Image (cartoon, rainbow, N blue to C red):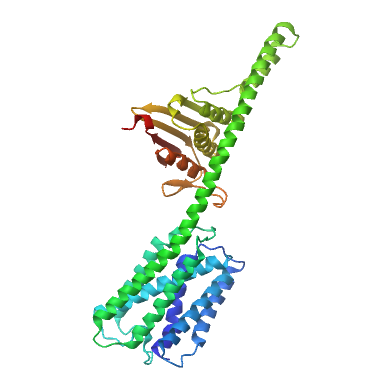
Amino acid sequence: MTQFEFYKSFQFVFELLLAQSVFVFRFRRRRWFWLRLPAALALCFLFAWALPVPTEDPFYMSFIFLLIFLFTLLMNKLIFEESWLSVAFCCVAGYTTQHLAFELYNMLLVALEYPQSNGFYGTGAFTGLFPDLFTAVMYVCSYAPAYFVFYMLFSRQLRAHEPIKLKSTFIFFIAASVLIVDIVLNAVVVRSNVEGAKTLRIVIGVYNMLCCFFSMFLQFEVSVRKKLEDTLGIVEQMYHQAKEQYRISKENIEMINLKCHDLKHQVHKLRSGCDIGTKELAEIEEQIGIYDSSVKTGNDGLDVILTEKSLLCNKNGITINIMAEGEKLGFMAKEDIYSLFGNMLDNAIAAVRDVDPDKRIIMLNVREVGEMLVIRESNYFSAPIRFEDGLPVTGGDRRFHGFGMKSIKYVCDRYGGDLTVKAENNMFTLSILFLPKDKEN
C-alpha cells in the first residue's frame, strides 16, 4: 500500500467524516440510528479502500476524493432524517473545513522546510501515519484549530431541528464549485512538486485557504440571509395582524364596559325595589366588577391592551401591578403600543403560570426619567431561560413559536429604543429606553 492509498482509504475518510460531524450532529436521527451509524462508517471506509489508483494523474486523484465525498453524503442521508439540501449543505461545509486544515498542514511543513516529498499524496510505500513526532504535532496543531474555528464561526449558526433554507441555490452551487476547483488545482500543484518553489507553494497554500474561507462564508451567507428574511416576514405579518386585533379588542372592551355600566344601574334598581337578598346582589356586583376592570393610563392604545391582559390575569389568578404614565407614549402609534405591550405581557403571563401561586405577580412600570421614557416589566419564572443574541428563546418548536420577543425588538427598533433583558434569581426583567423624537436634539 502506497502513502496515497492509505491516505485516501483511511486518513482522508476519517478527517472528512469528523469535519462533517461538526455540522450534522444537530440533525434529527433516523430510527435505529446507533445501528445505522457504525454500518455507515464501515461502508465509507470500505468504499474508499476499494477505489483503485491505477495512475498518479492529479485529476483522477481529485475524482477519487469527489467520489468518496459523494458516498459520505449518501451515508449521512441514510442515518439522518433531513432533506437532501440540508445534508448536502453540511457535507460541503465539512469538506471545506477538512480541505482548509489539509492546506494549513502542508503549508506549515513547506514554510518550515521540512523534508517531504508529496506529503499525503506520496507514491512511496506506506511506512506509518507520521514520519516522526514533529509531523504529528504539526498535524494536530493544524487540524484541531481549523475544525474548532469553523465550528465557532459557522456551525453554531445552525439550529437543531431547524431546516436549512437558502436564499439562492445558485450561489450555494457556486460555493461548492469553488471548493471543487480548489481541490483539483491543489492536487495539480502538489503532484508537480516543483523544487525550490517554497515561496510559490506558500502563496498557493494561502490562496487555497482563502478560497475555502470565502466558499464557506458565501455558503452560510445565503442560508443566514434567508433565515433572517423569513423571520422578518413573520414578525411583519404579526405586526400587521396586531393592528386589526387592536381595533377588534378596542371595540369589544368598549362594548363590555357599556354593558357593565348598564348592569350596575340595573342592580341598583333591583337593590331598592326587588326581593333579591343583599348578599346575592353583592355577589352579582362582584362578578360584574371582574369585567369592569378598565385601565385608564391616559393612552387609548395602552388602555386597551392593559384592560385585555388584566381580564386574562384575573381569570388565571395572576396579580398584575401597573404604574403607567400612558400619556408619555404619545409618540408611538396605538397599534405599535398594542403589539409591544401585548407580546411583553403574553410572555410574562406564560412564565408566571408555572410558578408558585404566591409568586404569580407581574409588575409593569411606564414612566419618564429625565428626557428618557423607561418601560420596565418584571415577573418570576421557573423554567431555565436560554439566550441567543441577547434575547431569550423559546423551549418549544422554534419554527412556530418564539417570535414574541422578536416582535418586541422590532417595535423598539422602529422607534430607536434600547432593549435589555435580564434573568437572575428566578426574576425576569425586561427594560426599554426611548428618547421621544420631540426631545431629541
372, above or below 398, in the image: above
Q: Is residue 402 visible?
A: no
Q: Position of residue 288 (x, y in %)?
A: 65, 20
Quadrant placement of the N terminus:
bottom left
Q: Is residue 121 visible?
A: yes
Left or right of residue 424, residue 272 in this image: right
Q: Position of residue 124 (x, y in %)?
A: 36, 92
Q: How many marks?
A: 0
260, above or below 415, in the image: above
Can you tell which quarter of the image residue 441 is in? top left
Residue at 34% of width from left, 72% of height from top? 209
Residue at 45% of width from left, 24% of height from top? 327
Q: Position of residue 75 (x, y in %)?
A: 55, 74
Can you tell which quarter of the image residue 311 is in? top right
Q: Nearer the viewer, residue 189 or 107?
A: 189
426, above or below 185, in the image: above
Q: Position of residue 377 (x, y in %)?
A: 45, 34
Can you tell which quarter of the image residue 155 is in? bottom left
